Amino acid sequence: MRSYQTMLNNGETLPIMGMGTYSGENDIETTERAIRMAIKMWYIHFDTAKIYGSEPAVGNALRRAICDGLVEREDIHVTSKLWSSDHHDPVSPLQQTLQRLGMEYIDMYLVHWPVALKPWVDYPVPAEEDFEEFDMENTWSGMERCLEMGLCRSIGVSNFSSRKIEELLDFACVTPAVNQVEMHPMWRQRKLRATCREYGIHVSAYSPLGGPGNAWGTTNVVDHPIIQSIAQKHNATPAQVALRWGLSQGSSVIVKSFNLRRMKENMGALHLKLDERDLLDINKMEERKIMRGEWLSNDTTSPYRTIQELWDEEI
């Protein structure tokens, strides 16, 4: 499986196929069972976050798998994220994350969003009055302290636009290793990928299938005639084509399914080869910002509409 990893700008490696652990139900037993099945299928990158509520289940499942000899700790990559109400002191929430995981360190710690929330906001969709000024320099200084203390092996960001990346690099002593963003064949993030490539920042794609099953997601990606046609041509599934497209751009992908059949299907994307014609056809697909475009446009009161407007201006 070492061939399915990429080298980051700090010399650490990142498995290019990751398993997301967010679940609306957040059932601990279901999550633990899914992670155990995933390990048996050679998933070794697990993506969690404080706001997902899945850190205890991820930790339980991984510790049990290590004790049972299914995997070694050094072969596992664990990513978690700094929630937006904890920007004042990233060290303390990471220490709490480690307690919930039952681990001495995590492999990657990301700033979840480039916005700050008031300290008591522990829910994923805040109200307008929950926001406060974002001191990016103080936040990143705290992230660098996490790295210096050995609490994590890499630090990065999530949902950062090109402009936010450049603002961060004006004062950062450590360049982010990763920028995790929504990316799929209908939101290809071309400008952002070019910016990250310029600075040696790896782009990791969440919702690489367009987020079907999530509040903001649709099946427009896997149902698209171009994706369907390419899948038929290669005797593959539309999901495998969408995932292979992301991998072909040099990105890693974070897939989210607890269904055994779909977990196997997603892993099969590693063995699919797309030709130049396939990639040209995918580039003809109309781009739609599914998460921030469709879902938020239907919610005129959501403060994340402000993020959408800023993102549109910056990319």
Image: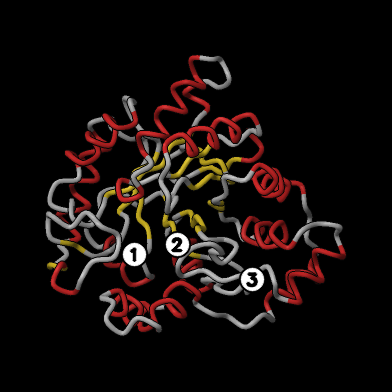
Three-letter code, disc 2: Val
The residue that label 2 is drawn on is 181
Q: Which mark is residue 216?
A: none
Q: Is residue 50 above or below residue 103?
A: below
Q: Is residue 131 above or below residue 96?
A: below
The residue that label 1 is drawn on is 165
Mark 2 nearby-residue class (10 Å; few <14, some 14–19, many ≥20): many
The residue that label 3 is drawn on is 221
Three-letter code, disc 1: Ile
Residue at position x 48%, y 54% in the image: 202
Residue at position x 29%, y 65% in the image: 125
Question: Would residue 155 be seen by someone viewing this image from the given angle?
Answer: no
Numbered disc total:
3
Three-letter code, disc 3: Val
Q: Is residue 119 above or below residue 218?
A: above
- Helix, strand or loop at label 2? It is strand
